[in-house]
Amino acid sequence: MTETENIKVENELTRMLNIRFPLVMAPMFLVSNEAMLAAGIEAGILACFPSLNYRNESELQSVLEKMNDRIHNRKGKYGNYGMNLIVQKANPWFKKHLDICIRMKVPVVITSLGNPESTINAAHTYGGKVFCDVINLAHAEKCAKAGCDGFVAVGQGAGGHAGPYPLILLTEALKKRFPDLPVMAAGGIANGRALLSSLASGASAGYCGTRFIASTEADVSAEYKQAIVRHKMEDIIMTSRISGTPCSVINTEFAQKIGTEQNWFEKMMSRNSKTKKYFKMLVQRRGFNWLEAAVKPGNYQNLWCAGQSVEMVDEIQSIQDIVADFIRGYFIAYNELKQMNSY
Ligand SMILES: Cc1cc2nc3c(=O)[nH]c(=O)nc-3n(C[C@H](O)[C@H](O)[C@H](O)COP(=O)(O)O)c2cc1C
């Protein structure tokens, strides 16, 4: 038991989600797994995963059953889980995964890349909360109109599909425009100090991905975890070759080989209204295959998705220890600020 285990930092969002500290373990394609979810819930935070990590329906159903049992059997303890749905038309699993989500009453749903309306309506029928990934105010406006419960503000430098704006600016802009909707801040938050700074800019929680790749529970190759520890922020590049949308990866030889931009043919096929949907599916299938190969041990085509927050990751730790460090770092920064003289 660590000295941070009984500490609670509460706000409206932590109460809404039944968590003890305003930290979210973000969903990560091919990285998030059952062990990470279990450890995140046990640590009292919100632990998320993308439904695409369980494309087989019975596997998805089984994970959800286990997580529901876990949160229902915790008797007064904190900790919760959420599932990420890619709501884009090019996701062939969307409808089936949404049906399972409703059947299993997933408590928190995170939507990304598309129109979240049908997901919001469906989750609200059973009391689920829906947070929408947004990178700008225009998309946030649509999500708010559709009735979302809050946002995931995805800022510059985030792992995965990073946004164009600095996180602090996007968070503040969202709070200014939608004061009643809680914001989870994503992009560059890998310790308690960064988390506190996001709360100061108006966020209600930090949404952290990259830090958790270097966890003992993540079931990815040791090479990938060590790459997270070894690389620095200048080693992160954006490439559109994986999904058609810019995605952050470590600048490996293989990343250089595939390049950062789609070629003219790919761009043309992605723009044409007749070919767009199917071509995107093909591009994404190829990208998934690259990434899938790269998380396995002994693979030489290293395509490792990670955000600029690799800068702040110095060791591979258990999720319990990562969360404990977040809490310690948060209070160190908080106390430093409290000691500042003000006149
Ligand atoms: C390896 C990896 C895979 C990701 N996969 C997904 C995903 O499947 N769905 C999603 O909504 N976001 C995905 N993301 C984005 C994260 O959920 C989160 O927004 C991001 O990691 C936050 O920035 P950080 O990496 O600096 O903490 C992924 C990020 C990483 C690093």
Image: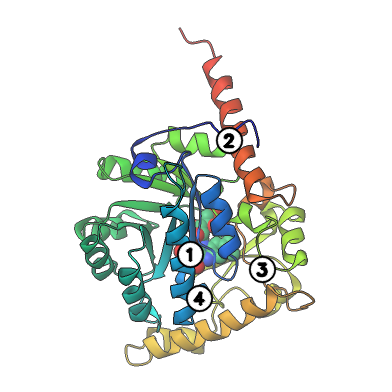
In contact (CB < 8 Å): disc 1 and disc 3:
no
C-alpha separation, residue under disc 2 versus residue under disc 3: 32 Å
**Between discs 1 and 4, the one toward the N terminus:** 4
Q: Is residue 244 visible?
A: no
- Residue 304 picture quarter: bottom right
State which quarter of the image contains the N terminus: top right
Is 208 placed left or right of 235 in the picture? left
Asked which secondary structure carries label 2, the reply is: loop
Q: Residues within 10 Å of mark 3 (few under 14, many from 20)?
A: many
Badge 3 is on which residue? 304
The front one of 270 and 330 is 330
Badge 2 is on which residue? 5
| In the depicted structure, whether residue 44 falls above or below residue 333 | below
C-alpha separation, residue under disc 1 versus residue under disc 2: 23 Å
In contact (CB < 8 Å): disc 3 and disc 4:
no
Where residue 164 appears, as percent x and y from the top left, is 46, 56
The front one of 75 and 280 is 75
In contact (CB < 8 Å): disc 2 and disc 3:
no
Q: Residues within 10 Å of mark 1 (few under 14, many from 20)?
A: few
Is 24 placed left or right of 178 in the picture? right
| In the depicted structure, whether residue 276 falls above or below residue 194 | below
**Between discs 1 and 3, the one toward the N terminus:** 1
In contact (CB < 8 Å): disc 2 and disc 4:
no
Kindly tell me whether mark 3's CB lies below 8 Å from ligand 1.
yes
Residue at 65% in and 35% down: 2
Marks 3, 4: nearer the viewer: 4
Badge 4 is on which residue? 54
